Image (cartoon, rainbow, N blue to C red):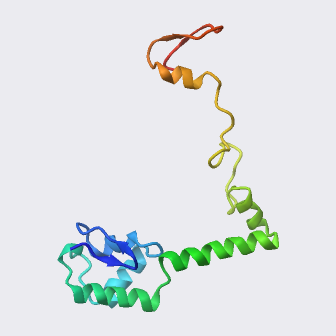
Amino acid sequence: MAARISGVTIPSEKQVQIALTYVYGIGPKSAADIVAEAKVEPTVRVRDLNDAEVSRIQDVINNKYTVEGELQRIVSGNIKRLKDIGAYRGLRHKANLPAHGQRTDPAPVGQGQRGAEHPLAAERRARPGGLVRLAGHRILPGGL
């Protein structure tokens, strides 16, 4: 049976300890702690869990962890607060740049910051392999 935990349908063919990491906010360490506290064998497959085991896992998560939508609201609220107070990290988030000190010089970062595409690139991709004759342009190798 496919188990639904914290609003997420976790994959039934995986081991419980691995499948729990599909829930936002639960990593490998938290998943191991959850199955230990729920007294569930970590290597058992999700499809082999009974309803009692699933409900024990769900109870542990509900009582001790902030996951999924609630966690995402907290994180986005923290980022919004940083932006509102004008903190350096908030400005980096506003500009869609790395906020944790990574270098940005060697390569463009993020969607839309890669620069303008070469004007002939789309036409070159249209016919890979052969020579492409473009109106008003020299003959170019198509594989470029």
- How many numbered markers are drawn? 0
Image position of 80 with respect to 39: above or below: above
Image position of 125 with respect to 66: above or below: above
Give residue 106's quadrant in the image: top right
Give the camera-side residue of 138 and 106: 138
Q: Position of residue 70 (x, y in %)?
A: 53, 80
Give residue 48's quadrant in the image: bottom left
Image position of 32 with respect to 100: above or below: below
Q: Position of residue 4 (x, y in %)?
A: 32, 76
Q: Quadrant of the N terminus?
A: bottom left
Is 66 left or right of 18, judged from the image as shown?
right
Q: Position of residue 47 (x, y in %)?
A: 20, 73
Residue at the image position 58 percent from the left and 25 percent from the top: 121
Give the camera-side residue of 72 and 98: 72
Is 77 left or right of 71, judged from the image as shown?
right
Q: Residue furthest right?
A: 86
Q: Position of residue 144 (x, y in %)?
A: 53, 21
Residue at the image position 55 percent from the left and 21 percent from the top: 123
Is 128 left or right of 113, judged from the image as shown?
left
Residue at the image position 76 percent from the left and 69 percent from the top: 83
Give the camera-side residue of 38 and 8: 8
Is 27 left or right of 141, judged from the image as shown?
left
Q: Residue furthest left?
A: 48
Residue at the image position 41 percent from the left and 86 percent from the top: 61
